[in-house]
Image: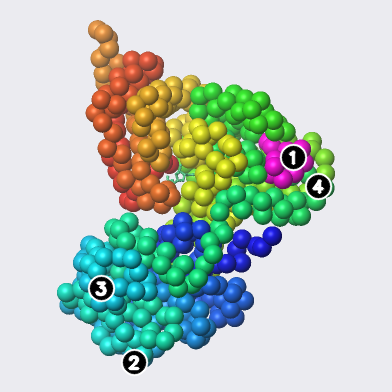
């Protein structure tokens, strides 16, 4: 079979916060795309043999010192290039045009008027609402270019080379504030780059199975199953590829949600018939965590102990040569940009542990090319139960980062009870599936309350619900008062030791999703 990634579009990242979004938009049209730092050497780009290149936006000025740049040879490759915002300005400046700072900064939704309906604007109205975000603009076009669209203040809102497949747009087609953005990207991908569109999850499964079999041979593979969507999908895929050569290990660290260990065991062993070892290590984790209140210390202890427990469990399995992991594409891009590209790297999560190096096993990472939404699509295709696919992310250190202060079995039980009530009420009201993550936090402070005729002096529970696309930024969920009321009154009535419920209305940034 032809390799799925043979037909690809490269997104060169000039420091844009939207580079990954551009990649996702292209993939939504069934074409593989990947992001590379803008300064990737020309030879590397050429060897990858893309069918098109997109130049992202970025915060710099093309005329500034050390302005991010890409290899100018790409403009002579005869393959289509689409510049977006900074990318367009870079192309212009590079090909003899002029970019200047403008008094008429455009920011937000702006109307553009098409002066040419063909090309990337095929099939679209001649007036479009688009998202602009720029303080510089093109003052003089390079000689060989023509205008495709303008706004009241920006005469070159979209441009095109007269004879080469080079296009530039000043606005952002990748954000949802540009309703026609999807069509513009589709036009670029299919009309201009002439893509065939074979990036589909059913093709992906076939190709991955073949790759995994080739990589693994007759050896055994271990996988740390967490119950989350990523490791579940990896397990399903490996099960299809190598069946009983896959050995899953589930570690109960005592920091899980109520009934989590039982449910995971039931789902994987009974429903999916996987080779599964469940290790109840809760006592050893809790012993090590006794008296520790510092969040980073908690994380380190948990990460270290996890490795020990995992190592012990995997030693009982024969002929293990590989460790499977649910590494996703955003994790891979971060490491590329950190060394090569201008994107400021903000760590999306603080993954606990360092399994690979410690264990001396080779890695099998079948989700390395996928975004989270693609992983879910893949899970659906593989027949994973709906509930499992739409589970909220749960941090590696578990409830430890939601239990501020000292970790004891008693406090964990209090938090678990409150968390269970909240999750139940979210399922009942239909809100569970509408949010990115929902969590309860138990605070180590006491406040006065009254229950019946008694004065209480108990702890508060914080309820936090957030919307997010990737966990990097998040907004608090405007949950209806009736749902909040139900959660609050049930927690206070049913959970001993809690006399107050508060709702967290902080955005990330500056707050984080978890409290530790
Ligand atoms: P923060 O709290 O950094 O969380 O806004 C962003 C996302 O990452 C998850 N998270 C973690 N995941 N180990 C993990 O595997 C961790 O130590 C960790 N801390 C936070 C968090 O649940 C959210 O989805």
Quarter of image, res 15: bottom left
Number of marks in the rendered image: 4
Q: Nearer the viewer, mark 3 or mark 1?
A: 3
Lower sequence index among marks 2 and 1: 2
Q: Residues within 10 Å of mark 2 (few under 14, many from 20)?
A: few
C-alpha distance separating marks 3 and 4: 59 Å
Q: Which mark is residue 219?
A: 4
Asked whether 305 or 11 is in front, the reply is 11
Q: Nearer the viewer, mark 4 or mark 2?
A: 2
Q: Are marks 2 and 1 in contact (CB under 8 Å)?
A: no
Q: Position of residue 6 (x, y in %)?
A: 61, 67
What kind of element bears circle 4? loop
Q: State whether residue 182 is above or below residue 485.
A: below
Asked whether 346 or 184 is in front, the reply is 184
Q: Which mark is residue 243?
A: 1
Magenta stretch bounds: 238-249
Q: Which mark is residue 225?
A: none
Q: Where is mark 2, residue-wise?
A: 143
Q: Position of residue 280 (x, y in %)?
A: 65, 27
246 in the magenta segment: yes
């Amino acid at each position: 079979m032809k390799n799925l990634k043979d037909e690809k579009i490269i997104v060169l990242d000039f420091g844009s916060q939207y580079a990954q979004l551009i990649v996702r938009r292209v993939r939504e049209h069934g074409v593989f795309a990947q992001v590379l730092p803008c300064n990737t050497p020309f030879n590397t780009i050429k060897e990858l043999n893309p069918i098109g290149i997109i130049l992202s936006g970025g915060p710099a000025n093309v005329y500034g010192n050390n302005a991010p740049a890409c290899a100018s040879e790409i403009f002579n490759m005869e393959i289509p290039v689409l510049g977006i915002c900074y990318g367009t300005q870079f192309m212009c400046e590079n090909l003899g045009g002029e970019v200047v700072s403008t008094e008429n900064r455009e920011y937000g939704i702006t109307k553009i008027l098409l002066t040419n309906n063909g090309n990337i604007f095929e099939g679209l109205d001649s007036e479009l609402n688009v998202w602009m975000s720029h303080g510089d603009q093109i003052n003089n076009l390079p000689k060989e270019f023509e205008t495709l669209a303008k706004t009241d203040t920006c005469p070159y809102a979209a441009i095109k080379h007269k004879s080469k497949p080079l296009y530039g747009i000043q606005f952002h087609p990748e954000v949802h504030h540009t309703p026609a953005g999807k069509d513009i990207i589709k036009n670029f991908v299919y009309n201009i780059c002439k893509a065939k569109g074979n990036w589909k999850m059913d093709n992906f499964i076939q190709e991955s199975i073949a790759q995994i079999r080739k990589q693994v041979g007759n050896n055994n593979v271990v996988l740390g199953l967490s119950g989350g969507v990523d490791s579940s999908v990896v397990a399903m895929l490996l099960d299809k590829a190598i069946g009983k050569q896959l050995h899953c290990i589930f570690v109960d660290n005592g920091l899980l949600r109520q009934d989590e260990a039982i449910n995971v065991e039931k789902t994987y062993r009974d429903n999916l018939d996987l080779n599964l070892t469940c290790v109840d290590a809760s006592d050893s984790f809790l012993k090590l965590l006794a008296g520790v209140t510092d969040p980073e210390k908690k994380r380190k202890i948990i990460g270290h102990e996890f490795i020990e427990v995992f190592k012990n469990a995997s030693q009982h399995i024969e002929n293990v040569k590989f460790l499977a992991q649910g590494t996703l594409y955003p994790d891979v891009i971060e490491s590329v940009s950190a060394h090569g590209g201008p994107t400021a790297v903000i760590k999306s999560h603080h993954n606990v542990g360092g399994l690979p190096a410690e264990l001396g096993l080779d890695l099998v990472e079948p989700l390395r090319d996928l975004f989270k939404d693609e992983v879910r699509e893949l899970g659906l295709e593989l027949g994973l139960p709906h509930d499992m696919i739409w589970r909220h992310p749960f941090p590696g250190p578990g409830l430890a980062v939601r239990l501020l202060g000292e970790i004891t079995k008693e406090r964990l039980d209090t938090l678990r009870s409150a968390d269970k009530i909240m999750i139940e009420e979210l399922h009942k009201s239909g809100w569970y599936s509408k949010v990115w993550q929902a969590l309860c936090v138990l605070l180590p402070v006491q406040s006065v309350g009254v229950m019946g005729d008694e004065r209480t002096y108990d702890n508060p529970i914080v309820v936090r619900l957030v919307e997010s696309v990737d966990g990097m930024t998040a907004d608090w969920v405007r949950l209806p008062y009736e749902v909040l009321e139900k959660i609050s009154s049930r927690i206070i009535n049913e959970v001993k030791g809690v006399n107050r419920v508060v709702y967290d209305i902080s955005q990330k940034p500056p707050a984080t999703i978890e409290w530790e």
